[in-house]
Amino acid sequence: MVIRVFTASSSGSVAIKKRQQDVVRFLEANRIEFEEVDITMSEEQRQWMYKNIPRDRLPSQGNPLPPQIFSDDQYCGDYDGFFESKESNTVFSFLGLKPSTASKKSEP
């Protein structure tokens, strides 16, 4: 299972850049493997992202803004959904992952 975070490296919006950094830093800090996909570098990836966001999750106006988060081909959500899951301590569920048990050692 691969977590993919769709970002835009050439965004002029400070808010979007901060949101992208927040998601990436959280994943790195929690040692969650992920792939960052820069939609400004690949029209094909940008189109894939747009096409795979469920219709009921699309903004009422304009295109969906990065970051957009997927687990394999399954849409997880945008920054707002990520932020809410972070605040309620349900990020693993949001990402479709089982909580990490790496910190717990099993004794024989």
Image: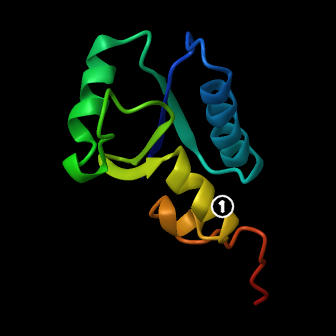
- What residue is pinned by disc 1? 86
The residue sitting at 62% across, 54% down in the picture is: 83
- Residue type at the position of mark 1: Lys
Say whether residue 97 is visible.
no
x, y percentage for residue 90?
A: 59, 70
The residue sitting at 56% across, 53% down in the picture is: 82
x, y percentage for residue 75?
A: 34, 50
Vertical order, 45 against 27 (above or below): above
The residue sitting at 25% across, 29% down in the picture is: 48
Q: How many marks?
A: 1
The residue sitting at 66% across, 47% down in the picture is: 27
Q: Quick one: which residue is furthest to the front in this view?
A: 61
Say whether residue 55 is visible.
yes
Vertical order, 13 against 24 (above or below): above
Along the viewing direction, whichever of 64 and 25 lies nearer the viewer: 64
x, y percentage for residue 32?
A: 63, 51
Along the viewing direction, whichever of 34 and 94 lies nearer the viewer: 94
